[in-house]
Image: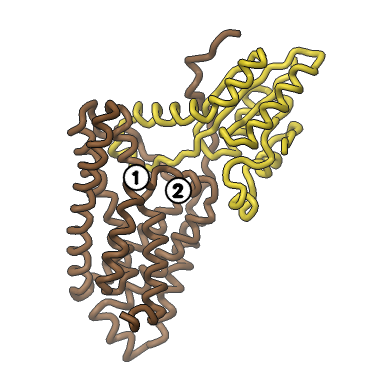
Chain colours: A yellow, B brown
Amino acid sequence: MKKILLPVDGSDNSQRAVEAAIGQAKGSSEPVEIHLLNVQAPIISGDVKMFIAEDQIKAYYHDEGIKALAKARAALDAAGIAYAFHIGVGPIAETIAAYAKEKGCGQVVMGARGLGSLTGLLLGSVTTKVAHLVDVPVTLVK
Amino acid sequence: MIEWLNNPQTWTGLMQIVIADILLSGDNALVIALACRSLPAHQQKRAIVFGGAAAIGLRVMLTAVAVYLLTLPFLKVVGGLLLLWIAVKLLLPEEGHGDGIQGGGNMWGAIKTIVLADLVMSVDNVLAVAGAAHGDIALLVIGLLLSIPLIIYGSTMILKLIARFPLIVTLGAAMLGYIGGEMLVGDVRVAPWVEAHAPMLHSLVPILGAILVVAFGKLFAAKPAAKVVDLAADEQQAH
């Protein structure tokens, strides 16, 4: 059994990573287990938490995650590939790395650049960070 | 007017105000989004408009009060210190606990939450803008007007950007530290003393403020721990 972690953010680049993972799953001789993941940046500060109930905050992250996953799920469903999907909350790259470990994934497939290509160019990308943090192969899809 | 436009202080002040607005309005925008999200669509718009209008009214009053207070002896020292603290706090990871007061399922509950939250959370913004404006009323008004669309429509894009690129926050915090330092030496009672005894403090203290803030922030900022939380754990479909 081969396990692939597929972190997406809903961008076109990450959608290309989904297509690549589908191709890989179809061409593989052994069964492939795909873990689709969206990580929500922890944008809700302690100040905001004073005013908004915990379940509202969780529901917000959940909805944003479902939105970000929608395109990838549609593509996987259309291709008839089985997958599990997850919505994480935390620092993006670190959380992706933690998931890779937790789910025992032997490979990470992700878009070479997600949302914000210009800022990514200037300040380093999530992808680069993930590649540093995990000790399994990371496939970057352009 | 021409003189005002030609004064470089006008433009640095304006730039500082824009950055402070962007950096410190995100939370307010988020509360509006979160407080309204469970309302039916037609009530959502009304809650945003009413809540936003009330919040803006409050902000105008708060700013007027802040500007007046900052002219009193030694209160700029207090304001400067407060701003330094706000800047350091920007850099610290916050794990705040989430037993927030209930937004309530109805429109008035949402409006109440928006107004109350804005009252508490715009203190930082008001203080930063008041400090950066250096008593220039035109700049103050521009700063206030600018923060309004950021609060109402600024949505969460800015916060997401900030979460991804912590460097933005570090630079912003340094700027707030600089403004805080300026306030310290700009106090009506402190300024004459500085002028007479140590004029170089005038430019030194703001720079020191910026450095101190970043140093403190780096010292206490623990790396955020990544936990495996799965909000979609309950809805896995079996294929």
Amino acid, disc 2: Ile
Q: Residue furthest top?
A: B238
Q: Which mark is residue B91?
A: none
Q: Position of residue B51 (x, y in %)?
A: 22, 42
Give the mark nearer the N terminus: 1 vs 2. 1
Which quarter of the picture shows residue A98?
Answer: top right
Q: Nearer the viewer, residue B171 or B28?
A: B28
At 63% from the left and 16% from the top, the residue drawn is A78
From the image, tell me which residue sits under label 2.
Answer: B158
| Image height of A118 relative to B81, above or below | above
Q: Residue furthest bottom?
A: B196
Pick the quarter of the image with the N terminus of chain A: top right
Circle 2 SS class: helix
Circle 1 SS class: helix
| Image height of A126 relative to B104, above or below | below
At 19% from the left and 53% from the top, the residue drawn is B58
Q: How many marks?
A: 2
Mark 2: few/some/many CA within 10 Å (<14, 14-19, 20+) = some
Q: Position of residue B91 (x, y in %)?
A: 45, 53
Which quarter of the picture shows residue A44?
Answer: top left
Q: Nearer the viewer, residue B173 or B25?
A: B25
Pick the quarter of the image with the C terminus of chain A: top right
Q: Position of residue B175 (x, y in %)?
A: 44, 65
From the image, tell me which residue sits under label 1.
Answer: B29
Question: For this view, does B87 lie left or right of residue B108?
Answer: right
